[in-house]
Amino acid sequence: NGVRINGATVNPYVVERLTAANAGTYSADVTNAFGTTRITAGTVTVNVARDDGKIQSNVQSLISAYNAVFKLTSDLKGKVLSDERGSLLNIESQFRDALHVKSGNSSAFKFLAEIGVTNGANGTGLALNTTIFQEALKKDPEGVASMFTDPTSGAAVRFKAVAKSMLDAGGILPARETSMKARIDANSTARANLEYRLGRKEVALNKQFNTLDALIAGLNTTSSYLTTQLAQFTANNKA
């Protein structure tokens, strides 16, 4: 289209991964010692077909990510973070709200359930009904795409925004991490103080024990002496 292509100075010139932006009329300037000649190579038309399989795969990836979040929070609620149940429920609520409200600008569909994205078995996670999804793609492909990619109401955009808000500085996850670290540090300090006090108590008890042990030894010696003296006194009286 009359615009010089940077780097197009080799023969052959190859363009990989064509996109719609590559469409246009191409020509080449051939230069030698006798001058330059422009050769018109012809018009390149790029037809971009919709890849329904790829679209479905991307939606399934979003669903898998959503389900992975809920599996993780469910596992944590029953195990190592059982005392953080409130925070984990808050995380689940924010992700659930991101995908269960009106999405995109389709004239035919408003909610993800209408295009096959529904609650999974027993209400756990999400599942994709591929038959309904493919039918929705045929009916309104651009509308379906907007339900995930619209900058303000797309489900994937909202999902990413929720995750980012939780991970950014000041988000719920860094805040809870900081809180837990503070608790760990406080416990470590308390443990160190307790061990110090126990050490001092052990020293004092050992000192008391040694004193009592010496006293008992002295009393035993005195007792033995008195026993001997008593025996001798008794013998002298009989004599």
Image (spheres, grey):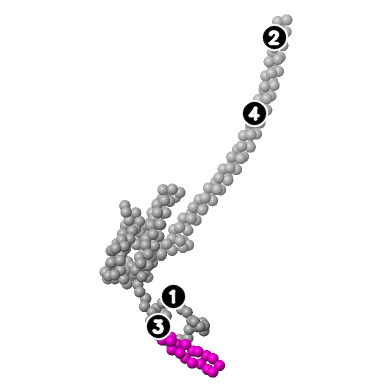
Dot 4 or dot 1: first in sequence order is 1
Residue to which mark 1 is pinned: 17
Q: Which residue is mark 2?
A: 234
At horizontal 43% and vertical 60% (from top left) the residue drawn is 166
- Label 3 sits on what residue type? Val
Residue 97: image location, x then y, percent: 34, 60
The crowding category of the residue bearing disc 4, from other C-alpha atoms within 10 Å (few below 14, some 14 to 19, many at least 20), is few
Q: How many angstroms separate mark 1 from mark 2 (CA)?
A: 120 Å
**Front of the two marks 4 and 1:** 1
Q: Residues within 10 Å of mark 3 (few under 14, many from 20)?
A: few
Mark with earlier residue (1, 3): 1
C-alpha span from label 1 to label 3: 14 Å
Local crowd size for mark 2, using a 10 Å CA cut-off: few (<14), some (14–19), many (≥20):
few
- Give the foreground label among 3 and 2: 3
Main secondary structure found in the magenta portion: strand
The answer to whether residue 13 is left or right of residue 114 is right
Helix, strand, or loop for circle 2?
helix
The stretch of residues the image draws in magenta is 25-42
Residue 238 coordinates in the image, percent (x, y)? 70, 5
* Point 58% across, 42% down: residue: 195
Q: Quick one: SS at disc 3?
A: strand
Amino acid bearing label 1: Arg
Q: Which mark sits nearer the N-terminus, 3 or 4?
A: 3
Distance CA(mark 4)–CA(mark 2): 32 Å
Residue identified by numbered label 4: 212
Which element is circle 1 on?
A: loop
Q: Quadrant of residue 156?
A: bottom left
Q: Are marks 3 and 4 in contact (CB under 8 Å)?
A: no
CB contact under 8 Å: marks 3 and 2: no
> Which label belongs to residue 44?
3
Badge nearest the viewer, 3 or 4: 3
Q: Residue at x 31, y 71 (%)?
A: 141
